[in-house]
Image (tube, rainbow, N blue to C red):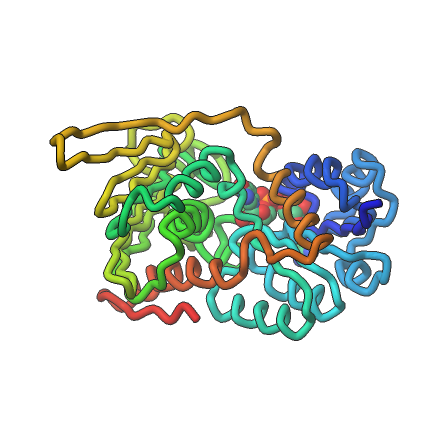
Amino acid sequence: MATTLKVGVIGVGGIARTHMPGWAASEHAEVVAGSDINPLALEEWGRMHGVAKLSTDPADLFRDPDIDIIDICTPNMYHAPQAIAALEAGKHVICEKPLAPTPRDIRKMIEARDQSGKKLMTAQHFRFKGNSQAMKREIGRGVLGDIYHARSWMLRRNGFHHTPSFVLKQHSGGGPTIDIGVHVLDLTLWLMGNPTPAAVSGVAIAPLAHLEGQFAAWHNQLAPKEWDVEDFAAAFVRFDNGATLVLEVSWLLHHDVEGEDMQMWLYGTQGGCHWPKCEFLETDYATRQLSNRTLRLTKDRMEPHALECVEFARAVAEGAPSPVPAEESLQVLAILDGIYRSQREGREVRIEAE
Ligand SMILES: NC(=O)c1ccc[n+]([C@@H]2O[C@H](COP(=O)([O-])OP(=O)(O)OC[C@H]3O[C@@H](n4cnc5c(N)ncnc54)[C@H](O)[C@@H]3O)[C@@H](O)[C@H]2O)c1
């Protein structure tokens, strides 16, 4: 008989909704409690999911002895304090991305995790997509040789965010660098085998968000003067194994895309590959043949936001390692934080990712 781990969800907004099918599908876990500072949203969520234990104070969930896992789905700036409080109360924690907006916060979370002996996972759902998993397996066979360069981007043409939790630094910690850069960078580093970042040169600027009468007016939402995060960032990263990476992220860009353009290329000594196409490019030097092949994929069995919850519950129940270790999120945030530092200092900056 499988253990049933009891889950408490904190922050029952948009992303929490995508986790619920995962908890419902898990053979190891069930959601028994929820917390949100918005009582109306909390009541509605409780009714929708048949969850009776509801509190506007997350501390009630931390001190509840019946709860084993805390699922943190609040805005970025609350991740570290809530995760640390939950770990100190003896709970396992799965936390939405970014694990925290700064490497300093993540180091504190790792310390709390190590002192508690509990598990901590970042909800980096792109790793749980079938194409990502298939590419990770294929790259793991060594088909690329040594990976020496990557190109990654996640770009939106008109992705104006109007909620304070995204465009005010006090809630988000940053703009698209933190919000979507964290997705594409985490996936790229994971596929590269998580090399240690050494230095970054970057820009993080807002050339479009503040233009009078443009995107903000179009969306008739938050006034541009209140928006204090960037809308565009670009970076060149060096790793200590000699590999390099070029990264571009934006919420607003005159780029030919409807919705979102997220892609990456990895280049190695034996081959290259492209995400999300799952295309692998190889060269047979003996016959002088260039070839391309695309991995065959089966249909994903579950949405990745749900699957990450299933996998976390399994790891907790079986005593397996965290499916997305906090140390890997520390590398990601060390680079993203380096982009902001490089923008401030106007030069390449060193990165401490440990
Ligand atoms: N993985 C993804 O694809 C993805 C997509 C969107 C958002 N996210 C992440 O999820 C998190 C939440 O984003 P969202 O889009 O769900 O935002 P949201 O605004 O829809 O929901 C956040 C909820 O948290 C509540 N809240 C705010 N402060 C709180 C606090 N201190 N304690 C308890 N509840 C609090 C709000 O009332 C709200 O209901 C962010 O960290 C974001 O980066 C991830």
Residue 18 versus residue 314 in the image, above or below: above
Q: Is residue 250 left or right of residue 89?
A: left
* Residue furthest front in the image: 286
Indicate the quadrant where residue 254 lies: top left
Where is residue 87 drawn, in percent x and y?
69, 66
**Above-or-below relation of 35 to 208:** below
Q: Residue at x 34, y 68 (%)?
A: 351
Residue sitting at x 46%, y 45%: 223
Is 262 located above or below residue 234 in the figure? above
Asked whether residue 66 appears in the rendered view, the answer is: yes
138 or 275, nearer to the observer: 138
Question: Count the marks: how many?
Answer: 0
Find residue 109 and report its horizontal and vertical position in percent: 59, 68
Q: Can the viewer see residue 225?
A: no
Q: Position of residue 226 (x, y in %)?
A: 46, 52
Q: Is residue 224 left or right of residue 320?
A: left
Q: Nearer the viewer, residue 212 or 105?
A: 105
| Residue at image coords 79%, 58% | 61
Taking 76 as reference, is 34 left or right? right
Q: Which residue occupies 62% across, 60% down? A: 120
Q: Nearer the viewer, residue 63 or 212?
A: 63
- Which image quadrant: the C terminus? bottom left
From the top left corner, tell me how far across and down residue 76 is, in percent.
56, 55
The quarter of the rendered structure image containing the N terminus is: top right
